Image: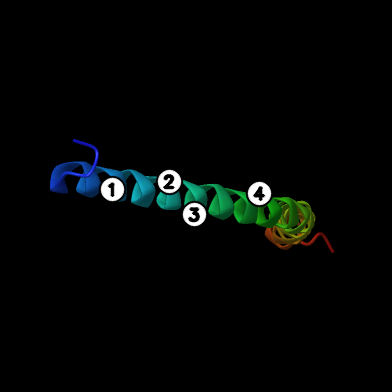
């Protein structure tokens, strides 16, 4: 029974599933690394946006002369 055509096909599908699982795990490792660097950029972008907002507020204030 283990050498039947059906058993061989099932075994091949199981192996393909494990290959796909390994690819997903590798992808998640890469995403974890990338998300760490994205967090650094996020902090810099927050500072930049805060500065832009403050400049916009300054421009909205009426000039008193």
**Where on the picture, by quarter, is residue 7?**
top left
Query: What residue would you read off at disc 1?
Result: 13
Q: Which mark is residue 32?
A: 4
Disc 3, SS: helix
Q: Residues within 10 Å of mark 3 (few under 14, many from 20)?
A: few
Frontmost residue, 54 versus 46: 46
Q: Quadrant of the N terminus?
A: top left
Q: Which mark is residue 23?
A: 3
Q: Depth-wise, is mark 1 or mark 4 nearer the camera?
A: 1
| Residue lying farthest to the right in this orientation | 65
Q: CA distance from mark 2 to mark 4?
A: 21 Å
- In the rendered structure, which disc, 1 or 2, sits on the residue that comes first in sequence? 1
- In the rendered structure, which disc, 3 or 2, sits on the residue that comes first in sequence? 2
Q: Residues within 10 Å of mark 4 (few under 14, many from 20)?
A: few
Disc 1, SS: helix
Q: CA distance from mark 1 to mark 3?
A: 15 Å
- In the rendered structure, which disc, 1 or 4, sits on the residue that comes first in sequence? 1
Query: What residue would you read off at disc 2?
Result: 18
Q: CA distance from mark 1 to mark 4?
A: 29 Å
Frontmost residue, 19 versus 44: 19
Q: Depth-wise, is mark 3 or mark 2 nearer the camera?
A: 2
- In the rendered structure, which disc, 3 or 4, sits on the residue that comes first in sequence? 3
Residue beneath the point at 66% across and 51% down: 35
Q: Depth-wise, is mark 3 or mark 4 nearer the camera?
A: 3
Residue beneath the point at 44% across and 52% down: 19
Q: CA distance from mark 3 to mark 4?
A: 14 Å
Circle 3/circle 2 CB separation < 8 Å: no
Frontmost residue, 3 versus 29: 3
Q: Quadrant of the C terminus?
A: bottom right
């Amino acid at each position: 029974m283990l050498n039947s055509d059906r058993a061989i096909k099932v075994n091949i599908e199981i192996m393909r599933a494990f290959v796909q699982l390994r690819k997903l795990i590798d992808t998640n490792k890469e995403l974890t690394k990338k998300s760490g660097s994205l967090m650094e950029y996020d902090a810099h972008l927050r500072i930049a946006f805060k500065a832009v907002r403050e400049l916009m507020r300054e421009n909205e204030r009426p000039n008193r002369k």
